[in-house]
Amino acid sequence: MSGVIDISYILLDDIFKFVRFIDQYPSRVLTVSSIENHLIQYINTNGILMNNIPKSTHNIFSRHGCNYFILSRLKRNDPISLHPDMLMFDNDNLSGDESI
């Protein structure tokens, strides 16, 4: 066993089930955040648009702090409408009334 998972062999229909499985049963070696770059490469290679990614998967990426995922979508000019759940900052501090 090489200790490396090649997610390119996972079918398009199964990739988000795979992400959900890893989220539900994380290990010390395999977590959503540890394979974030591989997932980005998989999504880019297969031409998956942000709007085709289930909201539950967006929530998983957000919970695991997968900021590069969001940045990669913006870099590719993917036509996205970000869910409020995907924003990684505190909306309460955006009013401008409070000093930093």
Image (cartoon, grey):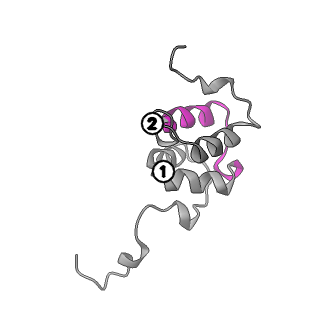
The foreground one among 83 and 78 is 83
Specify whether 73 is left or right of 45: left
Residue 12's place in the image compared with 67, above or below, is above
Quarter occupied by the N terminus = top right
Which of the pair 45/35 is nearer the observer? Answer: 35
Mark 1–mark 2 Cα distance, whole angstroms, equals: 14 Å
The location of residue 92, given as percent across then percent down, is: 40, 78
| Residue drawn at x 22%, y 75% as measured from the top left | 100
Farthest-out residue, left:
100
Q: Position of residue 38 (x, y in %)?
A: 53, 32
Instruction: Please identify the quarter of the rendering in which residue 41 is found.
Output: top right
Q: Residue at x 66, y 38 (%)?
A: 18
Q: Which residue is mark 2?
A: 28
Q: Main secondary structure of the magenta part?
A: helix
Q: Looking at numbered disc 2 in the image, what kind of residue is underneath it?
A: Arg
Query: What range of the chain is rendered magenta?
Result: 35-52
Name the spot of residue 24 as percent of width and height, x first. Answer: 60, 47
Indicate the amino acid at tag 1: His
Horizontal and vertical percent for residue 96? Answer: 32, 81
Location of mark 1 (residue): 64
With respect to residue 95, does 75 lie above or below? above
Say above or below: 96 vs 39.
below
The mark found on residue 94 in the picture is none
- Which residue corresponds to the image point at 67% horizontal and 32% vertical from the top-left? 46
